[in-house]
Amino acid sequence: MFKKVNSRVNFPQLEKDVLRYWGEMDIVNKSEQGEDRPLFMLYEGPPTANGSPGVHHVLARAFKDIICRYKTMKGYRPLRKGGWDTHGLPVELEVERELGLKSKQQIEEYGIERFNEKCRESVFRYVKEWEELTARIGFWVDMKDPYVTLDNSYIETGWWILKQMWDKGLIYKGMKGTPHCPRCVSSLSSHEVALGYEENVPDPSVYVKFPLSGFEATASGNAYDRVMGHGLPVYLLAWTTTPWTLPGNTALAVDPAADYSLVEVDGPNGKEALVLAQALVDEVVKGPWKTLDTLKGSDLVALTYDKLYDPGEFGVDVYQFRPPEGSGGGGAILEAVDGFTPRVIDGDFVSLDEGTGIVHIAPAFGDEDLTAGRHSSLAFVQQVDLQGNITGSFPFAGKFVKDADQDIMADLKGRGLLYHRGVYKHTYPFCWRCKTPVLYYAKESWYIHTTAMKERLIANNRGINWHPDYIKEGRFGEWLRNGVDWAISRERYWGTPIPFWQCESCGEYHCVGTIAELKAMAAPEYREQVDGLDLHRPHVDEVVLECPGCSGPMRRIPEVMDAWFDSGAMPVAQWNVTSQEEVERLRKDGLFPADYISEAVDQTRGWFYSLLAISTLITGESSYKNVICLGLILDEKGRKMSKSLGNIVDPWDVLNAQGADAIRWYLFTATRPGDSRRFSQKLVNEVVRRFMLTLWNVYSFFVTYAEIDGYDPNRDKAPDKPSSELDRWILSEVNCLISQVDDSLDGYDPTTGGRRIQEFVDLLSNWYVRRSRRRFWKSENDQDKLSAYSTLYTCLVTLAKLMAPYTPFMAEEMYQNLARSVDDKAPESVHLAAFPVADADLVDQPLMEATRLAKRLSSLGRDARSRAGKKVRLPLRLALVRTRDASESGHIESIKGQLMEELNIKEIRLLTPDDPFYAEAMKAAGAARSVAVGDYQAVLDSGYMVAIDTSVTPQLAQEGMARELVHRIQNMRRSAGFEVTDRIHFYYQGPDDLERVIAGYGDYIRLETLSEEIRRGQPGEGGRVEAQKMEGMDITLGVSRV
RNA sequence: GGGCCCGUAGCUCAGGUGGUUAGAGCGCGGUCCUGAUAAGACCGAGGUCGAUAGUUCGAGUCUAUCCGGGCCCA
């Protein structure tokens, strides 16, 4: 009937067998069939296959898989299309490294075409390993027909999306503060910047005096009159570590809520007054000073001051920020102006921890300055070129910025505008390639005007079901509320080319939305070329369009798109959508939006955002409904796993040693999904031992005895409500478990469900089976035995189904052997079976409480025994029991039998609440847990008491010896290698006391040890003999198989 | 510098809406039990629940500040 189950299981081998079975039976395919079932749509966040998959990939894939498997069992039809992310800077950097290229110039000399071919090759380098790992961990996903972001069809949809935004006026060109390497003449991405931080970098620290000159008409003139009222020249004192940015200064920022002091000091030309934050006066002002006045930062706003350097005088153009049309977004457009008056603005970023509380603002340098420039429509002065050299006709023009620092400081000093200079050491980024200090430099960039849709994004986010829920209004909600426009252009090579063509004669831009449109708009001599064109650079750059306005030649702008745009486009790009009608069809077919996605928390600014932003902008709604946001994987010591630390755990090591189920179970149950988690092979191994082997042993136990008795689940059906309390109890537990696991998976919380399963398996093994063992050994096939088989069978089959989403392999193995082997009509796989449904009628709350009480009192009783030095094999006469309340006392009658057996005590007596014995024991024990009272050993714990009568009568002693004998014979049977069903002869030699035990308990011993006869003497050939000591007697025991 | 998360035994983690003496597993020492078990039971050692202040009759739990770790953004 059932296949024999070895208790020494090799899980990795078992899993490989299951994988083969799934393959042979085409189970994955079958799980996706059934047109009448509602669709369950998973969006797979695409990985890049230019590196080996790590444990964090296993984590995300396991969480994707468990929900899909669960939904399949709940009657849904899962759709899981795999995908590959193939574009982006990390790919380019990898190839640059391989080719030994060090700058963009070198890439262009090498040739964009060849370079991009190398990129294309590298992104699929590890595909095979990804596919193998994915299959091995049991993640069911379609990897045969994945979406690939470098495909023309995928790129085309990216274009179409941009075109939708373009037509709605959501695309514009603006300034962006970018980390820039002046030697490589290239922007750095944030993660390149992160590669190059160095600590304790010395930079000049200068305090600069800006002469106050007046105030803007919009402000009240009071503060100006106040500060000027002392008859001294007044300077606003600002601090900077980058003197070279001073010629670009167009504003000073103050904290409107802070107090500022007007202090009188000795200047180079006599007394003068400085304005700076009150809190920093002591630290900054050198020499004697006295406070003339105290003002609020808000009083200073709109004061004006003299420029240190007038750009007009030194031949540098001046621009001013103008907000983009529509709502005020993060972007802004610059327009040329003739001149400007620098002024004081308020800034929430102003720090009172260092500097002077007055911050120098140069919008051309630094993102914060740029943002301030946008908000306050400041002037914009860019006096540095992309090589980092000062432009214009300044005395220090033509110098590299860091070299110009000295000249500028000297110049200001000569003019009496340098208050103080020193050296400041801080952490500063350097180009990771060439070690040149990175400059923050405002550059033009293309933007998506996402802030125009901010309210919509926030509203859509409210509709998303986040797990853990704090992400919704916390990290992600915060990001959306503080969102700025999305800068999508990259001055790079390997990416989706931005489909904007600009007319060389009239300067107009045109956004191309499809390949067909490209062909239609191409100048006649280029039309042919469009057929079969690789849409990547440099090929697409060669296509010249004809300007619809002036018929002039239009050329594509050189930039490519941010790779996050690619991945965020996948809901439509994976189907090559190029019209709103097709989007509608996806929606109707249930392919949009996704029911579920799951990635790690670092994707809040990545994929979670790009998905939401793109779908909100083109469809008005979110492209996903439910998310599990996962924490990071740390190493054994809680450090981030990284190549440089050498603490990466290779998932294959764990898969080969412990198996996929073990790694999955660990990831599901060890921590809540959103928390970061430590990971090591040791931790996974613990899961195997504590949970998986325990369950496996129950399973193996069941099969062993079911085989012996020829138990047939079809024939030997137990009644729905068995008479055995133990059976009714575990069935009650298992039905509770079904609801709990169902609820937790339905709520996208596998962790809670998994932990409940773990607790159940512990109860099943260490109480149900432990208490039921004798019922399986009994020789006759009576109703009670069948009930035990049937109950345990139900539990195991139910467990297999509950665990199928968690541990698909072990569940399959148990299901095949227990369920499918006896029922041809059962689904071919546990993953095609229906998820169990709880039967509320079988849930018996009082019975579960009673059993909990029985476990508790047993513990106390064992404690009492061990304190009294009475081993459990020795039967005792009486235990006195006290419970905490009447409802618990009411349970005693029903659990008496279990307690008597567990504790090997002849009688259990319940004490009334006011029994004097309890009061006496309490008093004698004091704070102690245990106390001896007369013949009794009492153990007290939080209102409970178990007191055992420790007096041993000769009869009890004899019975104890009988049990001891049985125990020893059993051990001998085992060491002799007998089967559990073998009949034996039992031989003994010893003193009269032993004779008396044999005489009194012979029948009992025969029954327990399957001895046909008990003989004085020793067994012949083939038997086993041992000389032993028992209770001070020298005895000889022997066994032989009949 | 900003946002979010975490901090409970040597390790991994539980501890709805505040309420007796803060729990489990692993590991360690001991005892016991064993016709499934590489298992299990019981005891012991091991905790200022990151710190401080507050709210409260009462705080691991609520509030504030700080410290440490992590992530994201500057």
Image (spheres, coloured by chain):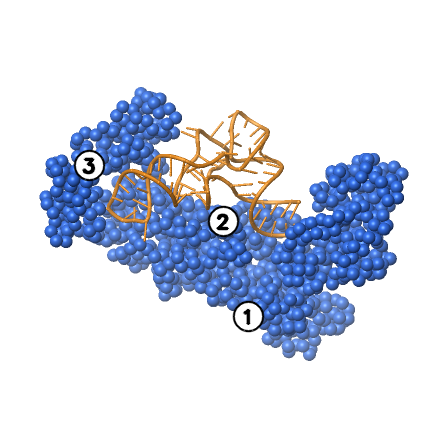
Farthest right residue in view: A231
Q: Distance between the residues labelled 2 and 3?
A: 51 Å
Q: Specify the subunit that label 2 lies on.
A: A
| Amino acid type assigned to the residue bearing label 2 in the image | Lys
| Amino acid type assigned to the residue bearing label 3 in the image | Glu
Q: Which residue is drawn at 14% across and 53% down?
A: A1022
Q: Kindly indicate the quadrant of the structure image that contains residue A280.
A: top right
Q: Residue at x 60, y 53 (%)?
A: A605
Q: Are marks 3 and 1 in contact (CB under 8 Å)?
A: no
Work out whether A762 lies above or below A32. Answer: above
Q: Which chain is orange?
A: B
Residue at image mark 1: A121
The answer to whether marks 3 and 1 sit on the same chain is yes
Q: Specify the subunit that label 3 lies on.
A: A
Residue at image mark 3: A1031
Q: Which numbered mark, 1 or 2, is in the foreground of this view?
A: 2
